[in-house]
Image (tube, rainbow, N blue to C red):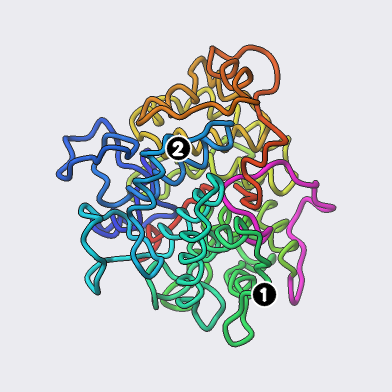
Amino acid sequence: MNVRRSAAALAAIGVLAAAAPATAADASPSPKVAVPDGLYGKADPTYDGVWRQSLTLLAQRTLGYRPAPKAVDWLTGQQCANGSFAAFRAVPAKACDDKTQVDTNSTAAAVQALAAVGGHEREVRDALVWLTTVQNKDGGWGYTPGGPSDTNSTSVVIGAFAADGQDVAKLHNRSRTPYDLLATQAVPCDQDGGGALAYQPDKKGKLLANADATAAGLLGSLGKGFVAQAGKAPAKDGCVKAAHPTPARLADNAGAYLASAVARTGYLKSTLPGAKDQPDFGNTADTVVALAADGRTDRAKKVYAWLEKNATQWAVQSGPAAYAQLILAAHAVGAQPGDFGGTSLVRSLNAQGPAPQAEKAAEKKAEASDDDSNTGVWWIVGVGLVAGVGIGFLLSGRKKNRP
C-alpha cells in the first residue's frame, strides 16, 4: 500500500491488510487534530503520532544526529503514568484513564527510540514493566492489552526488550516465551507459503503467509528491533523442516520466503482489496531490512535499488515514518541515504520537524551525507548510537491485519 497507517487507523476504515503503522499522507486534507509543536510530520497524528515520532528519532540517531530536545520531550510527554503509550494523546497533561487506548506497538516503538536517544532509563524501564504485565499466556503480545497475540506486535515488543539489552528468551509467561509464539505462526515448509509467518491464524486456525508479518517475525526471531545491519548468510537458501525450529531457523526460513517473494518483481505487492499489482513500498522497505539481517544482502541490495528508483514520491506523500523506513533500509545494506535516487533522505526527514544536532565526532560525515551524497561511508560507528537496539522493521506492524 502507498501509505503505511497505524493499526487503529486501518481498523477504523475497515481495511484488511498486512503490516505496521505509519503516517497518513501529508498530501491529505488538513488534519482534524492540530499537530503539536515538536512532533514530526504534518498529517493528523491521531493514529500514528507516537509511532512516526519514534521511527524519526531512531533514524536520526542511526544517522549520527542528536534529536531536538523538544522532539524527545514530546515523545516522553505522551507516556502514561503506568509506563504505556497510546498512539496519540492530544492533551498529555490529562492523566490516562480506562478510556485511554494504550497499545503495545506504540509503547514498544517508543522504548526503542528512547533507548537509542539515551538518558531516559526511567521511561524505558516503566514501559518495559508495563509490557511485561500484558504478555499473553502463549508468550506473545496482541496490539491491545489482552488481545490475541500476533506476529507483528510480538516482534516489535521483542525489539523493545532487546534495545534495553535484555535476554528475550527469558521473557516468559507460564513457561512460554515470545519465540514460542513466533514458532506457532510459522507456515510449514511443505505448505503454500512455507517458511513465512502469519499475522494470526484465520478463523479456522489456518496459517496464511503474510509478507509484512514475515519481515517482522524474522527480525523478532533474531532478537532485533528496527535497526539492523547485514547478518551472516544462512547455510541453506530454502525452507528447512524442523519439528521444533530454533529462532534462528525461523528467521532463515522466513528469509527464504521473502527472498522468493521479491525475486521476480523486485518488490512486494499490495494486499489491499482492488490494488492490482500495486507496490507496497513500506512492506518492501521492511523486507530490505529483514533480508539484510538474515544475511541475504545481495537480494536486499537489489530490492533497495528498486526502492531508489520508485519510492521517492511515496515518501513525499507519506511523511516522516516513510523517510525513516527508507533510511533504516539504507542502513541495513550500507547504502548512502544522502543520495536516494537524487533525493536526500537525511534532509527530507529532518525538514519534517525540529532540526536535530549532528554529533560533534560525526558532524563532517553527517554533513557529507546530507550534501548530495559525497563519497565515503556515512554511517557513524563507535559512538554507541543504537547500542542494544539491534534491528530492523519497520516492522512495522500491527493491527492492520486484524479483521
The reply to whether residue 278 is in sight is no
* Label 1 SS: helix
Image quarter in which the C terminus is found: bottom left
Q: Write the start and end of the magenta stretch as one range.
A: 220-245
Is 232 magenta? The answer is: yes
At label 2, which amino acid type do we have? Answer: Pro
Q: Are marks 2 and 1 in contact (CB under 8 Å)?
A: no
Is 219 magenta? The answer is: no
Q: Quadrant of residue 146?
A: bottom left
Q: Residue at x 58, y 74 (%)?
A: 181
Question: Pointer 2: residues within 10 angstroms few (<14), some, or many (20+)?
Answer: many
Q: Residue at x 32, y 40 (%)?
A: 39
Q: Quadrant of residue 10?
A: bottom left
Q: How far across and how far down the image is residue 366, in percent?
A: 58, 22
User: Is residue 337 found left or right of 343 in the rendered image?
Assistant: right
Q: Quadrant of residue 16?
A: bottom left
User: Which of 332/390 is in front?
Assistant: 390
Q: Which label was assigned to residue 170?
A: 1
Which residue in the protein does label 2 denote? 279
Magenta stretch, main secondary structure class: loop
